[in-house]
Image (spheres, helix red, strand yellow):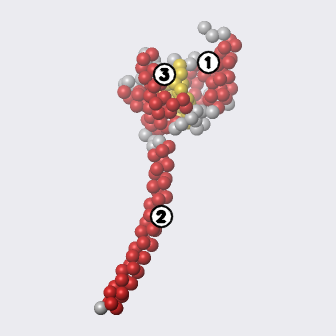
Amino acid sequence: MLTRAQKEKLVKEFAETFKNSSLIMFTDYKGLNVQQITELRRKLREKLESGARYRVVKNSVIRFALKEAGWDIEEISHVFEGPTAVLYVEEGDPIEAIKIVYDFSKKMKGVPSFKGLYLDGKYYGPEEVEELSKLPSKEQLLAMVVGGVQGPIRGFVNVLAGTLRGLLYALNAIKDKKSE
C-alpha cells in the first residue's frame, strides 16, 4: 500500500509525463495475465524502445495527474471506471503505438478493451481507435510527401531531357546529311 506522500510523488511524475506525451491511451486490461501484458510491453519496446510505456495505474492517480497536467477530465469521466492501464508515448510515432495495441487487442479477441485516448491534445473515443490504427506511420507519410514532391520534378526533368534529345537527334540528322 502506498503512503500519501508516495501517491503525491507518483501523481507529479505522471503529470510531468502526460505533459510531454503525444499519446495517452486508456485501456481496460481485465482479462490479461502478467505474461500477456509483458508480451504487449515487449512489442512496444521493440518498435518504440523506451519512448512508450504501458502501465497499470490506479484511477485516482491518473485522474489527479491529468488534472495537474492541465487536461480537461470532465469529458472522460467514463475512463475512470473499472481497472485501467495507460499507454503513453513520449518519443516516437504515436500511431505506431496505437497500431501495436490495436493489433494485440485483435489477436487477444478484444482484450485490452479501449476506453479512449488523447492524441496530440485531442480526445478520441474508443470507437475511433480502429480508424487511427489504419493511419499511415510517420515514415510512410514522409515517403508519400517525398514521392508527391518528386513526381512533378521528375516529369519536368523528363520533358526537358526529351526536348534536348529531340534537338540532339535533329543535329545528328543534319550532320549525317551533310557528311553524305
Which mark's residue is nearer the viewer, 1 or 2? 2
Residue receiving disc 3: 28
Residue receiving disc 1: 60
> In which quadrant of the rendered image does the N terminus lie?
top right
x%, y% of residue 40?
44, 25
- Label 2 crowd (10 A; few <14 / some 14-19 / many >=20): few
Q: Secondary structure at mark 2?
A: helix
Nearest the viewer among 123 and 174 is: 174
User: In the picture shown, does residue 57 fall above or below 87?
Assistant: above
x%, y% of residue 149?
49, 58
Q: Amino acid at mark 2?
A: Ile
Nearest the viewer among 110 and 162 is: 162
Residue receiving disc 2: 153
Whole-Å distance between the Cαs marked 1 and 2?
A: 55 Å
User: In the picture shown, does residue 53 fall above or below 163?
Assistant: above
> In which quadrant of the rendered image does the C terminus lie?
bottom left
Which sits earlier in the primary sequence, circle 3 or circle 2?
3
Task: Determine the residue positioned at 46% across, 50% down.
Answer: 143
